[in-house]
Image (tube, helix red, strand yellow):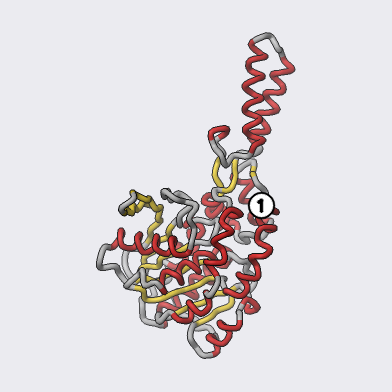
Amino acid sequence: MEDVVVENETGKDTFRIYKSGLEGPVLLLLHGGGHSALSWAVFTSAIINRIQCRIVALDLRGHGETKVRNPEDLSAETMSKDVGNVVEALYGDLPPPIMLIGHSMGGAIAVHTAVANLVPSLLGLCMIDVVEGTAMDALNSMQNFLRSRPKTFKSLENAIEWSVKSGQIRNLESARVSMVGQVKQCEGAASPECPKAIVEGIIEEEEEEEEDEEGGGSVNKRKKEDDTETKKEHLYTWRIELAKTEKYWDGWFRGLSNLFLSCPTPKLLLLAGVDRLDKDLTIGQMQGKFQMQVLPQCGHAVHEDAPDKVAEAVATFLIRHRFTEPIGGFQCVFPAC
């Protein structure tokens, strides 16, 4: 874990990254909307035991522990520039061979980064469960989905339990790490993100303390204890309000399929279901313009639900293109598609 400082004419931005591995190509991992670099933790353990590689997982702006001056600007252009700036800050003018791997929103940002040639040493590109057609269709129902999520959790364990039971993450091991980067502890009245009920509970508690000083007695003490319990039950909330990022959604995904197909580097598309393919990608896949693999029995967070299978697919892709070497006796299993 380290913080990368990016300086420009208007000031400094600090990006949180997580690194692993000592040699081989760099796999630069970009998470989906609302998630963080921690969503790649279990995948990282799996991939570095299969091939020689280095991992850099990045908290994108507005997410995780990254601190930027304008966290609300989640445009594809800004976030792809962030990726290029972090690579430059890490490696200067001579970056090592880098493969961009992104899930959902992160997959779209990976493509925009590649198309803009912001990573000059790019050797490969991988999108995980993001396709323009299905993504654009899903945008209409996204606000309803976001409204259906709990606004608060009484504990981190409660948030982890919800993520698994709801199917957002189907792997408990992944959820235990990933949810740490998705939710944060409320800070009471000082935090604008903290739900109103918590703030009111704090205010009521202060009033009751004043009454106690005037001899209010045991009734007020019981109220204070009840309000304290209420506060304890809503200690965690989402780190980012995704509903407020709606104006950027179209820019992430519109035209994505053709942008992906236009990238000259070797490409890999990992999907939770073949039904997600749109027309452009179907034609491109039939023409052999990219490698595709379907990982059934996964939810949208494919790399979290089946980290070993995703690691195997990425490792096989890199070995097939002779970008790296296997380690630990790893045997490639080449997919049919």
Query: Which of the pair 40/112 is nearer the observer?
Result: 112
How many labels sit on residues? 1
Residue at 56%, 87% (x, y): give it. 283
- Crowd class of label 1 (few under 14; some 14 to 19; many from 20; radius 10 Å): some
Residue at 43%, 61% (x, y): give it. 78
Q: Is residue 102 above or below residue 215?
A: below
Picture coordinates of residue 70, whole percent (x, y): 44, 50
Picture coordinates of residue 218, whole percent (x, y): 72, 15
For residue 287, side relative to residue 322 (left or right): right
For residue 67, side relative to residue 255 (left or right): left
Amino acid at the residue labelled 1: Trp
Q: Residue furthest bottom?
A: 287
User: Residue 23's quadrant in the figure?
Assistant: bottom left
For residue 239, side relative to residue 44 (left or right): right
Q: Residue furthest top?
A: 215
Regarding mark 1 in the picture, which secondary structure is present there?
helix
User: Residue 215's quadrant in the figure?
Assistant: top right
Q: Is residue 184 above or below residue 269?
A: above
| Residue 63 visible in rendering | no
Residue that numbered label 1 is attached to = 162
Query: Which of the pair 326/8 is nearer the observer?
Result: 8
Picture coordinates of residue 216, whole percent (x, y): 70, 12
Query: Which of the pair 193/291 is nearer the observer?
Result: 193
| Residue 241 visible in rendering | yes
Placement of the C terminus among the 4 image quadrants: bottom right
Residue at 50%, 52% (x, y): give it. 72
Q: Is residue 279 above or below residue 170?
A: below
